[in-house]
Image (tube, helix red, strand yellow):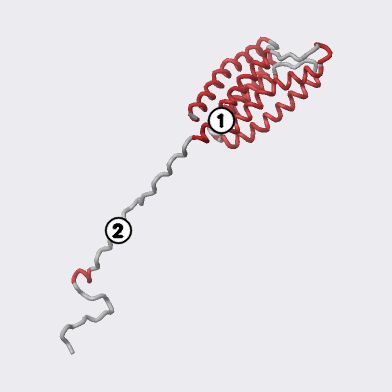
Amino acid sequence: MSVFLRRGAFTLMTVFAAFAIPFAVGEIIDNPGGSAAVALVALIVVPLALLVTEALHRPARSLRTLRGAVALLGGYAVAEAILTPQTGPVVAVAAVVLGVPLSVVGLHHAREAGVLLVIDGLVPFVSVVAAGLRHLGDNGGLHLSGSSAAAGMPLVIVGMLYLCAWVAGLNEPAPAPPSHQPRHRPRHRQPSRRQSTGQPPTGQRPSHAGQP
């Protein structure tokens, strides 16, 4: 059950990212376009490729990197919501970018990746809530933007699936340890030439029966 949940969470994240990231890249190419669009697309594709590569080859080290990245994203989201009049899709796109390597790490470390995915998915909501509190008197309430909700909800769902996989793995019986068998059979000691011919060992005088 645990393996099924891990694979299901990874597949869901892969399908979501396959639609969300090209959509974000297309929007950037349309607006602003030009050299600025090339730079922004590189800021999405290059970190994504590096993080996924690290997650594939060094999952434990990737966890430390992704913890810091999620913490930085949360701080940036709050700062952007408080200091700027409007929050753009930067936080939502960054959350999706971090969600892809986290789903890869979740195949090996379900609990840690699940917690980070839930936090990563909540970051866009925190950004919207912080912006709403700043402009509470202007618009009369808090409203979740469509891009933030679309980016955050799948990440939270994938994170919950990984946490369920971790819990399911706790209830599964541990695999039996492999039996240790000797690689080589013990060799039988071959009788020496003296023993086979009936001669006494070196240094031992033969006994003559019947002598006084």
Where residue 208 appears, as percent x and y from the top left, is 18, 83
Q: Earlier in the sequence, mark 1 or mark 2?
A: 1
Q: Would you place residue 183 above or below residue 56 in this image?
A: below
Is label 2 in a helix, a strand or a loop?
loop
Residue shown at the point (65%, 23%) measured from the top left = 121
Q: The C terminus appears in which quarter of the rendering?
A: bottom left
Instruction: Give whichever of 198, 153 is nearer the camera.
Output: 153
Is 144 positioned to the left or the right of 12 in the image? Answer: right
* Residue at the far top in the pictured view: 30
Is 129 positioned to the left or the right of 177 in the image? Answer: right
Q: Mark 1 points at which residue?
A: 106
Question: What is the CA distance from the residue labelled 1 to the residue labelled 2?
Answer: 49 Å
Quarter where residue 77 is shown: top right
Q: Name the disc covering residue 139, or none.
A: none
* Label 1: how many Cα within 10 Å (few below 14, some 14–19, many 20+): many
Instruction: Give whichever of 39, 153 is nearer the camera.
Output: 153
Where residue 128 appears, as percent x and y from the top left, is 73, 18
* Residue at the far front in the pictured view: 171
Instruction: Give whichever of 173, 24 is nearer the camera.
Output: 173
Q: Name the disc covering residue 187, or none.
A: 2
